[in-house]
Image (spheres, rainbow, N blue to C red):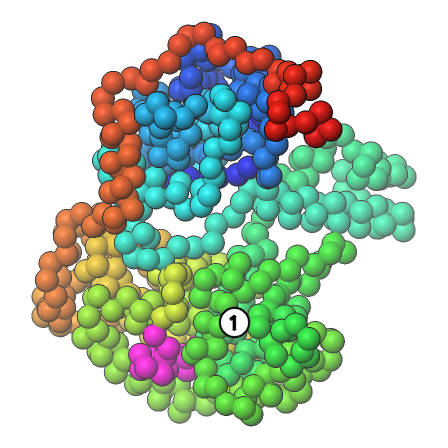
């Protein structure tokens, strides 16, 4: 997986890569690739601060000699990471991969037609999650002072990574062929949130101490210093404690998904979000006060910090307002009611008109809903495996039902929340999916409504027992689709952790679950075997589809990237001199000897 960032501080980047890291995870930082001058000087030596600064000066020399400035910064930084289950590669293999990325991105000499960029690849052990990785630092100013193109570099880096998976026989990214992806966390985002919470907690502690309350760990009468007066180590200790806590975006996504799945229309969606304790505000079209184009939500601050707002698209690809609207009936009355609720939420007023969210469910409704879900599961067995949109809709709604149940019963996100997050990954598609009205999955919407009512009666343990029975059947259906469509990673997740979480919930209610009858030759119950059972499970008899290919197909873009890599350096090592190029200070030269078309006044 590539992660690309831009900046203008080469020295800061190299010192960080050669340093201990945020949590002392960096071990034995060293070069694995780069131009020949760097490799001749430093080879396999472990890098320290002085050597990192020397490498940075070498890489920075073209930009400084020619005085070239690039919008966004001349430093291109890319980290390439493998999953922990992939294991570790050798330095030699990482050197080949780094060189191929430089070639694929067009930072090399382009088979002698351009001046090359200066670059280096640093490896410093595995990440905190156990992922083997390497860092590339590239100066976007070439040896002749021209600028390297970074047009669509994020997309190009992704395509190059898919080509590297093919070339080196690495694990293929499953979400590419499934056309889905989840929103990841940036380290800087997590740290900024943790810093804000830690500072707010500390300042609140100062206020409490000033009021005379005894604070554990502090001498009686000792004043609590201000945040700015704490040492760097003390601040970092408090920030690290917050980093270990659940991230706000995860909890927000859970509540928003629960509200969206249980709601029958947009107005109810707004009311359910507010009912779950979220701060809600709408984004209005320019020049209007009643046309809503998007929304953002935030958790209520607990320690006096400022709210952190997230748009729906940053919580999940399936939680943008246009996608949610595609699943609700669009009527003028509904649009007016929704606009009124959005306005009331923005101004902090009471809801305009309460709806189903206040309704208490009767035992008869539980029974009717259970019958509808059984019928739905039977119909899902006949949905073609190629119909990704319908299966994504089923996964999204099932995740929403679990999220609604978690929101109603779990004071702190637990097994239900984790199972909802795992199922939601199957719903994070690049494009809109089939709405429930066309997919015929309104029964799951009703299930989410029932789950949201558990805390207000919900028929107690009996109702929750029926709920877990329904959720297990739906999870089994999503799992079957993942197996047949060769999404092995997602299937293992559903068969392992997700099933274990749901079984713990079932055990907590002390109810014996009887599995729904399955067609002859069907797959085993979710997680009935070891984590690798997806490789041996038989195709359910109801899936009358041709066997999928053993390897997912390679796109035309990936093939083109592979050809570029192989054409540049099929086998031979990358050429280069062990001596760096001599670059005169072109700024001084141009000042003393202006050319005919570049006058002194410029």
Give me the residue at 67% from left, 35% from top.
Answer: 237
Q: Position of residue 598 (x, y in %)?
A: 64, 28
- Residue 445 lies left or right of residue 339; in this view the side is left
Res 359 quadrant in image = bottom right
The stretch of residues the image draws in magenta is 434-450
- Residue 565 lies left or right of residue 316; in this view the side is left
Q: Secondary structure at mark 1?
A: helix
Q: Position of residue 236 (x, y in %)?
A: 67, 35
Q: Position of residue 554 (x, y in %)?
A: 23, 47
Give me the residue at 55% from left, 21% from top.
Answer: 62
Q: Nearer the viewer, residue 93 or 502?
A: 93
Count of numbered circles on the image: 1
In this rendering, is residue 39 above or below 516? Answer: above
Residue occupied by mark 1: 321
> Is residue 65 in sight in this rendering?
yes
In this rendering, is residue 283 above or below 86? Answer: below
> Is residue 53 in sight in this rendering?
no
Q: Nearer the viewer, residue 365 or 87?
A: 87
In this rendering, is residue 15 above or below 559? Answer: above
Circle 1 residues within 10 Å: few <14, some 14–19, many ≥20: some
């Amino acid at each position: 997986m590539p992660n690309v960032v831009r900046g203008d501080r080469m020295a800061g980047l190299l010192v960080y890569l050669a340093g201990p890291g945020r949590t002392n995870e960096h071990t034995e930082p060293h070069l694995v690739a780069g131009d020949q001058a760097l490799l001749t000087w430093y080879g396999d030596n472990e890098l320290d601060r002085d050597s990192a600064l020397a490498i940075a000066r070498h890489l920075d020399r073209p930009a400084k000699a020619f005085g070239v400035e690039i919008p966004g910064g001349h430093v291109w930084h890319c980290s390439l990471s493998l999953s922990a289950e992939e294991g570790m590669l050798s330095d030699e293999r990482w050197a080949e991969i780094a060189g191929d990325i430089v070639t694929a991105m067009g930072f090399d000499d382009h088979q002698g037609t351009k001046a090359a960029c200066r670059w280096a690849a640093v490896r410093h052990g595995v990440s905190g999650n156990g992922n083997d990785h390497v860092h590339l630092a590239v100066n976007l100013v070439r040896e002749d002072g021209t600028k390297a193109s970074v047009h669509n570099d994020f997309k190009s880096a992704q395509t190059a990574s898919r080509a590297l998976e093919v070339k080196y026989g690495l694990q293929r990214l499953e979400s590419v062929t499934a056309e889905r992806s989840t929103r990841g966390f940036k380290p800087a985002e997590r740290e900024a949130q943790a810093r804000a919470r830690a500072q707010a907690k500390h300042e609140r502690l100062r206020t409490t101490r000033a009021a005379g309350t005894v604070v554990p760990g502090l001498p009686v009468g000792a004043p609590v210093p201000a945040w700015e007066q704490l040492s760097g180590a003390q601040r970092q200790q408090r920030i690290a404690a917050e980093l270990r806590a659940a991230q706000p975006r995860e909890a927000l996504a859970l509540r928003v998904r629960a509200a969206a799945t249980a709601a029958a229309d947009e107005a109810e969606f707004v009311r359910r979000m507010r009912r779950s304790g979220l701060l809600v505000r709408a984004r209005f079209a320019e020049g209007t006060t009643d046309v809503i184009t998007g929304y953002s939500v935030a958790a209520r601050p607990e320690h006096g910090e400022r709210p952190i707002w997230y748009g729906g698209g940053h919580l999940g690809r399936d939680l943008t307002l246009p996608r949610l609207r595609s699943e609700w009936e669009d009527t003028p009355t509904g649009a007016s009611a929704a606009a009124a609720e959005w306005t009331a939420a923005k101004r902090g007023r009471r809801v305009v008109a309460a709806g189903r969210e206040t309704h208490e469910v009767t035992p008869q409704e539980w029974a009717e809903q259970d019958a509808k879900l059984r019928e739905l599961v039977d119909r899902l067995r006949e949905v073609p495996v190629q119909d990704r949109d319908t299966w994504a809709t089923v996964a999204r709604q099932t995740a929403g039902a679990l999220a609604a149940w978690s929101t109603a019963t779990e004071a702190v996100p637990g097994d239900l929340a984790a199972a909802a997050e795992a199922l939601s990954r199957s719903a994070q598609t690049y494009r809109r999916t089939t709405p429930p009205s066309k997919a015929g999955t309104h029964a799951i919407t009703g299930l989410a409504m029932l789950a949201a009512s558990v805390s207000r009666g919900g028929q107690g343990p009996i109702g929750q027992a029926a709920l877990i029975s329904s959720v297990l059947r739906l999870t089994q259906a999503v799992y079957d689709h993942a197996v047949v469509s060769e999404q092995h990673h997602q299937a293992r997740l559903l068969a392992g952790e997700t099933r274990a979480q749901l079984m713990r919930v079932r055990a907590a209610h002390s109810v014996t679950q009887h599995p729904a009858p399955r067609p002859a030759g069907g797959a085993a119950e979710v997680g009935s075997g070891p984590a690798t059972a997806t490789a041996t499970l038989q195709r359910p008899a109801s899936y009358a589809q041709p066997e999928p290919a053993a390897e997912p197909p390679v796109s035309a873009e990936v093939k083109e990237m592979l050809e570029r890599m192989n054409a540049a350096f099929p086998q031979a090592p990358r050429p280069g001199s062990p001596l760096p190029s001599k670059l005169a200070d072109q700024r001084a030269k141009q000042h003393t000897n202006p050319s005919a078309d570049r006058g002194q006044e410029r």
